Amino acid sequence: MIDLYKVIDDKKVQCLLCPNNCKLSENQFGLCDTRSCEKKEVVNKYSGIISSSGTDPIEKKPLYHFRPGSIIFSVGFFGCTLKCQFCQNYSISQFHPSFNHEKISPKDMVCFLKEKKYDQIAFTYSEPTLYYEWVLETSILCRKNNIKTVLVTNGYLNKEPAKQLLGFIDAANIDLKSFSNDFYKKNCRGKLEPVLEFIKIACDKAVHIEITTLIITDTNDSEEEMIKINDFISSVSKDIPFHISKYHPSYNFNKPATDLNKLRKLIEISKNKLNYVYGGNIEDYSNTYCKKCNNLLIKRDFYSISTSGLDKDGRCNKCKSENNIII
């Protein structure tokens, strides 16, 4: 395990998990309200406490190119490394639990997965990297037991923790909330660059990645910003699936829901640079087509999935091209 904190002086320690790099006095919580200083160590008092769990279609993560049509067991947590004022899951991400919640150990979680014959698990709902030690240990045990791991994350993690954790993650959906550092600073109390670095590290670690951007009315919905996002993603790989999602008023944001015509326009712009672009939570733009011959590979009707356009290896059954699909 790498160092996740360092002692600064007799009174303070610095958390090294995320780019907030909080400097904490004894019994003080970081910006995340989850990790705190205890006896000159930074700990997560809530480690092992699950906010919610259950089975989901993997498309709900959203992952469209990783084991399409499969069911995944999902576990969620509390707290977040960011303070997004438009958070869609603020009831768990912006609060921490009481201590009377039951805890589960990584070993017991993996035993449960094996008993129920679940062959994949998603760490999701709020920010799983806050539970770094628990998620890492669970992922290592999953790797030993041939259970796939999925991380649904804001990607706001320092380089060394990211490198270590991503070595045991099979797939990830990463939120890229904007391509503006001012947006991250004003609306999320964070920074853009660490998220871009996390995406690059995940790619270097051969993690299957998909990216999601929530389009917020009059905030990050300009065509110019979308082109910048497209340029970045394509510089990593044009084959990264990109989910462009509709915003609804939530938490401290009351701007109107994203206009569907605006969303469709941004999707069409993105398709000029990227091979796989999806409307994240709208009916349009949910199918997957071969990037070479435009054969319909995966037809999606909400969570009813047909993969009849794929061969047994996940290639196009018409032209045999690979389309970054893991089955």
Image (cartoon, helix red, strand yellow):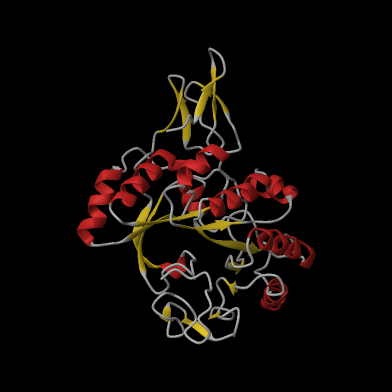
Q: Residue 40: x, y in percent?
A: 46, 20
Q: Residue 259 is drawn in which quadrant?
A: bottom right
In the picture as drawn, the residue positioned furthest to the top comes out as 10
Q: Indicate the quadrant containing the C terminus: top left, top right, bottom left or bottom right.
A: bottom left
Please, which residue is most extreme toward the front here? 320
| Residue at (68% x, 77% y) in the render | 264
Q: Would residue 181 be found to the left or right of residue 300 on screen?
A: right
Please state, as top left, top right, bottom left or bottom right, where the N terminus lies in the image: top left
Residue 173 position, x and y percent, is 52, 59
Residue at the (52%, 43%) spot, across then down: 162
Check the image and report above or below for 204 versus 293: above
Q: Left of 8 or right of it: where is 122?
A: left
Quadrant of the image occupied by residue 229? bottom right
Residue located 43% across and 52% down the image: 169
Residue 102 in sight: no
Q: Position of residue 140 (x, y in %)?
A: 35, 45
Q: Is residue 263 above or below residue 92?
A: below
Residue at the spot x=71%, y=72% of the render?
266
Left or right: 159 in relation to 4: right
